[in-house]
Amino acid sequence: MKPNLILAAAILCSIFSFSSLLTAQDNSYWIGKFEHRDGYQEEETLVIKRQGADFSAVYRELNTDQLWQYFSLKVEISANTASFFYDKCLPRKGDKNYEEGVDPHPCSADPYKNGDLMFKIVKTTGKNNKIKLLTYAGKFQDLDRNDNEFFYKSK
């Protein structure tokens, strides 16, 4: 009887290890650079990184090559949804797109609080099984669009 228990335990461990591996592989899609360009002079980038089991991101918005908004986010991933929570405003001084004395969204006037749900991105499958990203605004209304297609993965 003991060999059967050992075999059963080994099989269960293998299943859980394989399941964890699949989850990690699924989450790896989210690591990288996501962008939005409006066709005019506005460009948003979202760079997602992984540190151990935790995910974080940096959001950067340029308007006419000037840095408008720049903040870090904590990221929670569940299945095909990534939720982005406000962490902190990042200093603009020293950034190549920062114009001294011109700061349309200074950190001192930051309307967001740590932990605010800023937005969610849902990974779905569109035509021809192509990945489609749908963005749903939370506190950060700048990403709100009728079709919810805002970001695309660039790297």
Image (cartoon, rainbow, N blue to C red):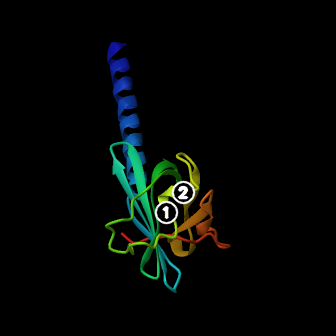
Number of callouts: 2
Return the residue nearer the eye: 99 or 113. 99
Asked which quadrant contains residue 110, the reply is: bottom right
- The type of residue carrying mark 1 is Pro
Q: Residue at x 52, y 66 (%)?
A: 105
From the image, tell me which residue sits under label 2.
Answer: 110
The answer to whether 114 appears left or right of 18 in the picture is right
Residue 105 seen by the camera? yes
Q: Are marks 2 and 1 in contact (CB under 8 Å)?
A: yes
Q: Residue at x 41, y 51 (%)?
A: 56
Task: Label 2, secondary structure: give it.
Answer: loop
Return the residue nearer the eye: 57 or 20. 57
Image quadrant occupied by the N terminus? top left
Image quadrant occupied by the C terminus? bottom left
From the image, tell me which residue sits under label 1.
Answer: 106
Asked which quadrant contains residue 96, the reply is: bottom left
- The type of residue carrying mark 2 is Asp
Q: Residue at x 62, y 61 (%)?
A: 137
